[in-house]
Amino acid sequence: MTDFVLLYSGGSMPETEEEQKTVMAAWNAWMGKLGSSLKDGGNPFTPASKTISPDGSVSDGGGGASGYSIISADSWDAAIEMAKGCPVLQGGDQITVYETFAVM
């Protein structure tokens, strides 16, 4: 099994309490379907971000990510199929899938 990071970008947050409940139900269903393949359900990001340059300078912004999750899968194809069921896609987000590898 290999770990994959699902990085979410774009989209919008639910505005009403009813929309929030609907979105949370979708997340719970998706996470339940993933079962033990879900390593870290992740969290959304706030809009605030900082970018650190190689020279050590820090600036506001620079990122477009809105959240993440970490899954385990047997292959890229399996990871992509899992990601296709993620509820962020319903809110207009895009998902970028990254394969990780252990170095430590």
Image: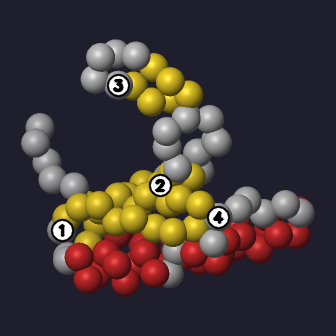
Residue indicated by mark 3: 53
Position of 85 compared to 82: left or right?
right
Tell me which residue sits at (34%, 66%) in the image: 97
Q: CA distance from mark 1 to mark 3?
A: 34 Å
Q: Earlier in the sequence, mark 4 or mark 2?
A: 4
Q: CA distance from mark 3 to mark 4?
A: 27 Å
- Determine whether label 4 and label 2 are within 8 Å by CB: no
| Secondary element type, mark 1 | loop
Q: Earlier in the sequence, mark 1 or mark 4?
A: 1
Residue indicated by mark 4: 11
Above or below residue 68? Residue 90 is below
Residue indicated by mark 2: 68
| Secondary element type, mark 3 | loop
> Looking at numbered disc 2 in the image, what kind of residue is underneath it?
Tyr
Closer to us: 5 or 57: 57
Above or below residue 63? Residue 89 is below
Closer to us: 35 or 18: 18
Q: CA distance from mark 1 to mark 4?
A: 30 Å
| Secondary element type, mark 4 | loop
For the N terminus, the quadrant is bottom left
> Looking at numbered disc 3 in the image, what kind of residue is underneath it?
Ser
- Determine whether label 1 and label 4 are within 8 Å by CB: no
Viewer-side label of 1, 4: 4
Q: Residue 30, position in %: x, y?
A: 54, 76
Q: Residues within 10 Å of mark 3 (few under 14, many from 20)?
A: few
Tell me which residue sits at (50%, 24%) in the image: 59
Question: Can the viewer see residue 71?
Answer: no
Residue indicated by mark 1: 1
Q: CA distance from mark 1 to mark 2?
A: 19 Å
Viewer-side label of 1, 2: 2
For the C terminus, the quadrant is top left
